[in-house]
């Protein structure tokens, strides 16, 4: 039974689809096309070069391969170091917030609050807090006799700092998603487990974790996406340093495209990074599926 | 029933609260210090010589760092962006949730798929598109391209799926057309979802960093996040000024958040369901 005119649904969809075609579908295809050209922003000619931009990224002698893979390494290290914390810490927060206690709504709002601040505020704030000589963190640690740590100037501390700041910033976001998942687990399952004499830990292990699996897959995927997009924290807190160790792939891409005007090359880098990300996401997805069966 | 929270539980809850609040408090405290005191070792917890100099510096209009102007730009961009998202996403979400037409599932799956394409893929091509549209360094670049994101459509569709069909059927018997049903019956019943989407879109746009950093150039046209990174570069060691800039960017969102936190949190919670 049709209750509306034949064209009506398309008219309702039209404004969004217009934007979608213009700013999502079009650019995705145009980017691919750019990556096959020597697309210099300043030059009139943009000759077709086939897969040259991609080949250059695998040619150790080319000028772009080294910075690109350094960027990939920085993004890779950050992702591997941050994703476990961004999955585990929020889970702990969610379990904490899932208990019934006075002021629960208030604390839930407080733990989520950092997420509403943008990366610019977070970056400036922590750049100062983490300063080696007059940062409050080193002053605080000094009280316990811990010598000054170069949070923004030494490795591995720079990565520790970037991961910690990112956890501080976004843990509340993932926690809220977990919390919704926790509230979907039927109370009867816990009651049944309790009747069987399961301890709190056993309940967590055999009721909570399996119940959260679908939500966890979602969280891992969005966290991977966010980590691969890592840009602002490194730009504002470590400025890519020490050396270029925290200069992420996205920083290299923007530098290639916007500072060196080599947009075709930058587009090729974007697609290669996206491909790597898709492979990692698929592997994670498969691993989590396997553990389910 | 589960046990009452223990003392350990409360210690943990309070410690985590401090962990959230103290960095923000430190930012505000530093903003009223003098430059010398902001670099004191060990740091002073309470400003010895509090002054509004840093705020004077960032809030005076004109000059190289018009923070107030950036705040206005950010507000205008975020408000227009949120309005656009709510209009196009609710219309599209309604069609995808409640109408029957060819390719519906294909269109929806295709839109949903793009939710998982990382943003940097669109950076170079959309920049060139802005250049061709002569939108570089304008408000349009901040307002319009972002409204093509799939989240709003997905979010509104999920909400409309849950509205009872009877509401529409009563109106149909009265001979109302689709547009009337949508604007008079569906939208008024979708107020919580519309409010949530408005707030989430506003916040996302207000906080966006990478895109405005590259599509805006003129100092007087920047948004707060892009401007703050400029401020950090210009006042390398004048931490009170940098912290005052960060405070000016943080306080409006935190105040907004106090009033709308329920919508923000419910919106985020719902985005994970069926993800």
Image: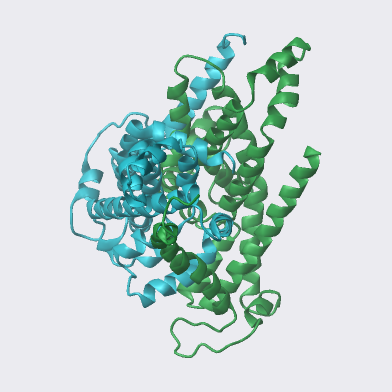
Chain colours: A green, B cyan
Query: On the rendered image, what quadrant is the C terminus of chain B found in?
Result: top right
Residue at 24 percent across and 50 percent down: it is: B58
Residue at 43 percent across and 54 percent down: it is: B92
Pinpoint residue B73: horizontal percent, then vertical percent.
27, 55
Residue at 46 percent across and 31 percent down: it is: B20
From the viewer's perspective, tell me whether residue A196 is left or right of residue A168: right
Q: Is residue B258 above or below residue A132?
A: above
Q: How many marks?
A: 0
Q: Is residue A135 above or below residue A210?
A: below
Evaluate whether residue A150 shows in this view. Answer: no
Q: As rendered, which of B94 and A269 lies closer to the eye?
A: B94
Residue at 74 percent across and 25 percent down: it is: A205
From the viewer's perspective, tell me whether residue B194 is left or right of residue B12: left
Q: Quadrant of residue A212?
A: top right
Pinpoint residue B11: horizontal percent, then vertical percent.
53, 17
From the viewer's perspective, tell me whether residue A269 is left or right of residue B234: right
Q: As rendered, which of A214 and B27 lies closer to the eye?
A: A214
Q: Quadrant of residue B48?
A: top left
């Amino acid at each position: 039974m049709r209750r509306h005119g034949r064209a009506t649904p398309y008219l309702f969809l039209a404004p969004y689809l217009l934007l979608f075609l213009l700013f999502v579908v079009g650019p995705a295809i145009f980017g691919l096309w750019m990556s096959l050209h020597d697309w210099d922003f300043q030059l009139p000619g943009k000759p077709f070069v086939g897969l040259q931009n991609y080949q250059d990224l695998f040619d150790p002698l080319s000028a772009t391969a080294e910075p690109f893979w350094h960027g990939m390494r920085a993004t890779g290290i950050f992702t591997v170091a941050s994703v476990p914390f961004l999955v585990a810490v929020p889970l702990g927060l969610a379990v904490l917030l899932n208990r019934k206690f006075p002021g629960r709504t208030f604390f839930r709002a407080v733990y989520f609050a950092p997420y509403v601040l943008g990366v610019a505020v977070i970056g400036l704030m922590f750049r100062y807090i983490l300063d080696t000589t007059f940062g409050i963190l080193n002053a605080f640690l000094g009280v316990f006799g811990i010598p000054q740590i170069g949070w923004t100037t030494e490795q591995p501390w720079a990565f520790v700092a970037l991961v910690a700041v990112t956890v501080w910033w976004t843990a509340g976001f993932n926690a809220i998603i977990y919390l919704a998942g926790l509230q979907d687990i039927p109370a009867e399952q816990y009651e049944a487990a309790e009747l069987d004499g399961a301890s709190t830990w056993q309940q967590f292990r055999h009721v909570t974790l399996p119940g959260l699996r679908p939500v966890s897959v979602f969280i891992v995927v969005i966290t991977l996406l966010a980590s691969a997009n890592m840009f602002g924290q490194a730009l504002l807190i470590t400025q890519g340093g020490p050396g270029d160790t925290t200069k992420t792939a996205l920083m290299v891409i923007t530098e290639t495209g916007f500072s060196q005007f080599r947009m075709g090359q930058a587009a090729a880098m974007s697609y290669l990074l996206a491909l790597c990300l898709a492979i990692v996401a698929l592997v994670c997805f498969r691993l989590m599926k396997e553990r389910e069966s | 029933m589960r046990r009452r929270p223990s003392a350990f539980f409360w210690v943990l809850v309070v410690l985590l609260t401090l962990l959230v609040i103290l960095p923000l408090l430190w930012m505000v405290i530093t903003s009223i210090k003098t430059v010398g005191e902001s670099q004191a070792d060990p740091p002073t917890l309470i400003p010895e010589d509090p002054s509004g100099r840093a705020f004077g510096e960032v809030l005076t209009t004109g000059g190289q760092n018009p923070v107030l102007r950036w705040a206005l730009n950010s507000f205008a961009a975020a408000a227009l962006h949120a309005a656009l998202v709510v209009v196009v996403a609710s219309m599209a979400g309604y069609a995808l949730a409640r109408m029957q037409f060819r390719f519906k599932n294909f269109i929806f799956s295709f839109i949903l798929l793009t939710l998982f394409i990382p943003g940097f893929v669109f950076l170079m091509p959309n920049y060139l598109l802005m250049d061709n549209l002569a939108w570089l360094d304008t408000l349009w670049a901040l307002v319009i391209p972002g409204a093509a994101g799939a989240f709003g459509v997905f979010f509104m569709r999920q909400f409309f799926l849950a509205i009872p069909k009877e509401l529409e059927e009563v109106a149909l018997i009265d001979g109302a057309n689709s547009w009337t049903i949508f604007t008079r019956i569906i939208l008024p019943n979708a107020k919580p979802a519309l409010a949530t989407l408005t707030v989430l879109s506003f916040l996302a746009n207000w906080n966006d960093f990478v895109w405005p950093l590259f599509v805006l150039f003129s100092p007087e046209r920047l948004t707060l996040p892009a401007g703050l990174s400029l401020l950090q570069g210009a006042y390398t060691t004048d931490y009170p000024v940098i912290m005052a800039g960060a405070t000016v960017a943080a306080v409006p969102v935190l105040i907004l958040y106090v009033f709308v936190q329920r919508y923000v949190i419910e919106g985020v919670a719902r985005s994970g369901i069926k993800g």
